[in-house]
Image (cartoon, helix red, strand yellow):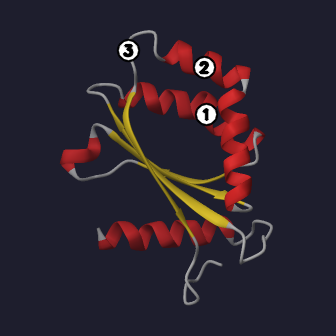
Amino acid sequence: MKAFLRTLSLITLATTASAPTLADSERVFELRTYTTHEGKLPDLHARFENHTRWLFEKHGMRNIAYWTPTDEALADNTLTYILVHESREAAEASWKAFSNDPEWQAVYQKSRENGPLVKHIDSTFMKPTDYSRIR
């Protein structure tokens, strides 16, 4: 877990270092972890690769990085990623717009033709600490 968090910090730093800065007091990171139904992780990857990440950007959510665990117990059913939002309010507005987007709704329905992909979603909003390399 320590190695994962260290890698997460380094990747996030590298991907946000050249990005336009947002007000430190308002910008939030969102850590999301999806647990899929058995055998559905490849379909979830395809949905993100071909559609979801582009729709996130369309609605003001900045993609930072995507991971799958190397731990055997989670490797076949887990996707974790981080988004950056200008503020918590902006995140709420972006998620609402994304959810109501007809393109997303069509992609979502099509991807579920053989059953639902996602069993559970965990979402955590985060702010960097004063001693973080990212602010």
Residue 124 is marked as none
Kind of residue at badge 2: Val
Picture coordinates of residue 34, whole percent (x, y): 40, 42
Locate the N terminus by quadrant: bottom left
* Proximity of marks 3 and 1: CB atoms separated by less than 8 Å: no
Decide: is 122 above or below 48. below
Mark 1: secondary structure: helix
**Disc 3 marks which residue?**
115
Q: Kindly identify the residue that appears in the image at 37 percent across and 31 percent down.
A: 41
**Disc 2 marks which residue?**
107
Structural distance between the alpha carbons of marks 2 and 3: 14 Å
Q: Kindly identify the residue that appears in the image at 63 percent across and 29 percent down.
A: 51
Left or right of 122? Residue 74 is left
Mark 3: secondary structure: loop
Q: Kindly identify the residue that appears in the image at 36 percent across and 66 percent down.
A: 4
Locate the C terminus by quadrant: bottom right
Give the mark nearest the N terminus, 1 or 2.
Answer: 1
Between 103 and 10, the one lying in front of the other is: 103
Picture coordinates of residue 49, whole percent (x, y): 56, 34
**Disc 1 marks which residue?**
52
